Image (spheres, coloured by chain):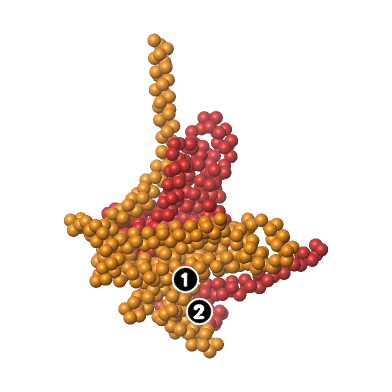
Amino acid sequence: MAEKRKRRLNKGRLISMAILIPITLLWLVPLVWGFVTSFKTDADIDAHLLSFIPREFTLDRYIKLFTDFEQYPVLLWLWNSVYTAALYTILHLVVVSLAAYAFSLLRFKGQNILFTCVLATMMIPTVINLVPMYNMMVAFDWIGSPLALIVPGAAGVFGLFIMRQFFLGIPKSLIESAQVEGAGQFTVFLRIVLPLSSSAFMVAGIFAFLSNWNDYMWPQIIMGAEDIAMMTLPVGLSLMQGSYNYDLGLTMTAAITSAIPVLILFMFTQEKVIEGIATSGMKD
Amino acid sequence: MKRSCNRKETKTVNRVARIRKALVPVAFLLPFGIIFCMFVIFPFIFGITISFFNWNMFDASRTSFAGFGNYYKILFNSESIYFSYFWNGLKNTLLFVAISVPLLIILPLIFAGLLDRKPYGFRFFRFSLFVPTVLSISTVVIIWSWQFYANGGVINEFLKKIGIGGPNWLNAQPWAWVAILIVTLWWTIGTNMVIFSAGMKNVDQSLYEAAKLDGAGAIRSFWHITLPGISNQIVLCLLMTMIASFNVYGQPQLLTGGGPVIDGDFTTTVLMMRIRTIGMGANANPGVSSAMSVCMGIIMIAVSIVQSRVSKRRGD
């Protein structure tokens, strides 16, 4: 009986695996092909476009990208993207964790109404904010400045929501016992809540980083007409893609180069990212 | 005398303490509040205001009140160039929403359902299907352009090998839309899949056992147990996906550039591209662009309200 049930279970697992294998291969083909192609010579690409094994292995394009900053500032773009995304993430986490503490562990008049109002703004179609934000950036003289990519999005409601949910789960007794010993709210926040919340910070942080890292339209608006050296990766890459000055193989190599850091980050944080997205689906 | 003085003193001390206590939440909320009001609330109100003006960004003296003029222009004045821009862009955006949203729900449901059967290699499958979501649209489009090129593109080269002449993907219809759709599916399907997956994990497993005893197959129990069990997630994803599809910009902008142009009709120029180009740049008309945004926002809100009504009724 037990034997039989086990076998039936295995059948379900096998069938789903059999269906998923071709789908997944199809999904991976463009990425793997792009990666392989970046190591092929131009002649090899022309002759054997579909082959997944380079006849002649070349690092020429990578060498070009990593040495000729004047013409191919991919590494500069990479650096710009890294530091704007990192600063954005830090600012976002600070701002959002402070507010989440007020919304979860403090008590004040109008708390629930205020939080509901903040959540309700998620329904505002962001398209309406686009032109006025551009006007504001012009007025602030932030066109071309990384500040425009760091500050405006820092009060993200999604991060606030994740943090608040997490803080609500912290045992009240821990906080009360600290308060009995005379700790103020800020001390409680720093000494008790923060050390307990690393996983909430991870989830909200990865989210913030990825969304800033991959943003295209807004950085294109801010940096698109500026010095090429100021651009973030998505903006610079789109410039390469749309320009005839760069050959296709090189553009592909730049795209692969830009993907590698996020892919590595994602490999190590996979569980957290997926858990974070899954949490976002659990709210009503 | 001394006693009353004391009482007064404690009273002021109390008041100071009370004010201090009341200020604590304010202090915690302040950084968030400032950024939130400045960059979320204010632009929203500002945007609606701009839509009622002939707005000049660089010369305030040339800004004048327009009333509903901008709205009239884009909605009813068929003489105006903005009229055709708006309706053409809206048509394309709605077309994209209509074809992308169902697929962006159904395919992730199927994938999540397969993953829920715990296939061997589960983690590998989940990783592979999810991984494109962490790439930027520029990277995605560069990789996919190579697949779609009419001459020397991977897909057509492959089709040639098996004796089929491939279409001119990015320069002919309906292929340009098909290409945009394929890229969108490949890029974004992972998010919904992971949300559905998590929902399926929480479905009561004993229901499946009971269904099995009643002789229900995998597909029937998926239909009658899994789907109702994750209705919350489906409603949420439907809303998020719809909003994302309305906001589509990068895929057509970078992949087809809004073309191909057939009989003067920009066949893949979505409304977001119009709002972006009309609202900024040298010949900007922020008033018209904002009016377009407000109209688009109203349509989005209307669609979400209808959708949540429908799904609520289904739930009852």
* Type of amino acid at the residue the image marks with label 2: Lys
The orange-coloured chain is labelled B
Query: What residue appears at the point 42 percent right and 31 percent down from the top-left corner?
Result: B20
The red-coloured chain is labelled A
Q: Nearer the viewer, residue A56 or A22?
A: A22
Q: CA distance from mark 1 to mark 2?
A: 37 Å
Q: Position of residue B235 (x, y in %)?
A: 52, 59
Do residues under tags 1 and 2 come within 8 Å of each other at their CB atoms? no
* Type of amino acid at the residue the image marks with label 1: Ile
Q: Which mark is residue A40?
A: 2
Q: Which mark is residue B247?
A: none
Return the residue found at the far bottom.
B163
Q: Which chain's residue wears label 2?
A: A
Q: Position of residue A157 (x, y in %)?
A: 45, 51
Return the residue found at the far right.
A1
Q: Nearer the viewer, residue B173 or B313?
A: B313
Query: What residue appears at the point 43 percent right and 77 percent down from the top-left corner?
Result: B176
Residue on which disc 1 sits: B99
- Res. B297 image quadrant: bottom left
- Res. A147 image quadrant: bottom left
The reply to whether residue A59 is visible in this rendering is no
Instruction: Pick the quarter of the image with the C terminus of chain B.
Output: bottom right
Return the residue found at the far left.
B61
Q: Position of residue A175 (x, y in %)?
A: 55, 36
Residue A50 lies left or right of residue A131; in this view the side is right
Q: Nearer the viewer, residue A157 or B208?
A: B208
